[in-house]
């Protein structure tokens, strides 16, 4: 028999992602509807170590569905990476009589959650990261909004690229994952996509840019994920040296991709995952992540999530190549 859940806590951790707020709202309101008290922890694992708990009511999460960022704030905590930090965190949870913890965050945050689970803490993880690099879920909260931001930015860059007959090398975020770049590349009609998972050469890039010029195109867009090596600035210098038909400009989209109003898709995903997290935390389903598997939100063991890597869809790589012809 599992212990009756009377009080849970929720935190957001790692890089913020649009949709974290609707997710917090769903966790708080679902728990309250079931007679469970909820404490919000300000500042991720760092706040947990410091004991930054505050009880949350239904009105505390009003008016946040449409807001990017996270009202609970987030952090990257060095101290929590160490066993001593994790022990302090567990002591704080015990002091506050917390029966279960909901961690909303990315890959690193879920690795952190596993450390608490190893010590017997009842933790449910909710995947939220624009990188979409988490095994066990088709989508993370924030990805759809970030992709829409990227598409909007590249559509604008194409206007200026065409007006000046230029090539653009556009860098998306994604840490070591090419997900955002490949998806953006397909939906903006990029001439080429560079991702860390697939090797490429400067010759190949130069040839794509040259062909676009010689075929009479008035621009060329190359989308590169931030994890590529050489970096976009190094690549740009090497490409410019070759004196191609198009001059090249670099645009690094940066943190703008993490902000903004969550799309309807992200609000729905966040609401569904927050709702399910409370169901999982009160059931036998402990130590799981809310994964979007096909069209359902399924309990995915966190031990699997942290021990496996999400791989890039090779079909999309080939599709991007063929559609760019
Ligand atoms: P994200 O969750 O967006 O991937 P990070 O990788 O920065 O962001 O992770 C967020 C926080 O999770 C880190 O600052 C750290 O406190 C914690 N964390 C990450 N990896 C581990 C780990 N292997 N063990 C313990 N804690 C970790
Ligand atoms: O994990 C989300 C992310 O935006 C990555 O795409 C990027 O590499 C990283 O976080 C940037 O981190 P910071 O906000 O610390 O600059």
Image (cartoon, helix red, strand yellow):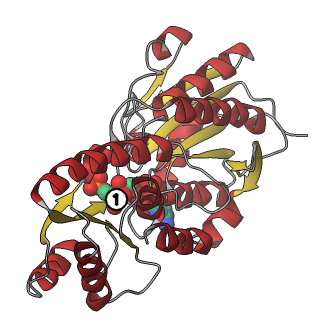
Asked if residue 135 is positioned above or below residue 213 in the image, the reply reads above
**Which quarter of the rendered picture does the C terminus lie within?**
bottom left
Who's the residue at 66% across and 44% down the image? 124
The residue located at (42%, 56%) in the rendering is 184
Left or right: residue 280 compared with residue 170: right
Residue positioned most to the right = 1
What residue sits right under mark 1 in the picture? Answer: 173
Q: Quadrant of ligand 2?
A: bottom left
Quadrant of the frame with the N terminus: top right
Q: Is residue 49 visible?
A: no
Write the residue at 44% across / 13% down.
63
Tell me: is circle 1 under 8 Å from ligand 2.
yes
**For residue 46, above or below residue 41:** below
* Spot occupied by residue 52 in the image (x, y as percentages of width and height): 40, 32
**Image location (x, y in percent) of residue 45:** 43, 47
Judge the density around disc 1: few (<14), some (14-19), many (≥20) Cα neighbours within 10 Å.
many
């Amino acid at each position: 028999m599992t212990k009756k859940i009377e009080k849970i806590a929720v935190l957001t951790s790692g890089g913020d992602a649009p949709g974290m707020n609707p997710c917090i709202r769903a966790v708080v309101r679902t728990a309250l509807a079931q007679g469970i008290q909820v404490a919000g922890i300000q500042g991720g694992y760092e706040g947990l170590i410091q004991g930054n708990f505050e009880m949350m009511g239904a009105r505390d999460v009003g008016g946040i569905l449409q807001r990017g960022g996270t009202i609970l704030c987030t952090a990257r905590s060095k101290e929590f990476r160490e066993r001593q930090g994790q022990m302090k965190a567990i002591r704080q949870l015990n002091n506050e009589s917390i029966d279960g913890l909901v961690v909303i965050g990315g890959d690193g945050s879920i690795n952190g959650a596993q450390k608490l689970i190893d010590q017997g803490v009842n933790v449910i993880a909710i995947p939220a990261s624009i990188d979409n690099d988490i095994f066990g879920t088709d989508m993370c909260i924030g990805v759809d909004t970030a992709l829409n931001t990227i598409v909007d930015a590249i559509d604008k860059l194409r206007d200026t690229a065409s007006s000046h007959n230029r090539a653009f090398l556009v860098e998306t975020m994604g840490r070591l994952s090419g997900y955002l770049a490949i998806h953006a590349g397909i939906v903006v009609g990029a001439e080429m996509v560079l991702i860390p998972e697939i090797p490429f050469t400067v010759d190949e890039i130069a040839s794509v840019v040259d062909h676009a010029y010689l075929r009479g195109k008035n621009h060329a867009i190359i989308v590169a994920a931030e994890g590529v090596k050489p970096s976009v600035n190094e690549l740009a210098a090497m490409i410019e040296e070759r004196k191609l038909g198009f001059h090249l400009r670099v645009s690094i989209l940066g943190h703008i991709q993490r902000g903004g109003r969550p799309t309807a898709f992200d609000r729905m995903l966040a609401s569904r995952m927050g709702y399910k997290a409370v169901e999982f935390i009160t059931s036998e389903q402990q130590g799981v992540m809310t994964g979007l598997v096909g069209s359902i939100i399924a309990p995915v063991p966190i031990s699997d999530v942290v021990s496996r890597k999400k791989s890039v869809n090779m079909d999309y790589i080939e599709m991007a190549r063929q559609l760019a012809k």
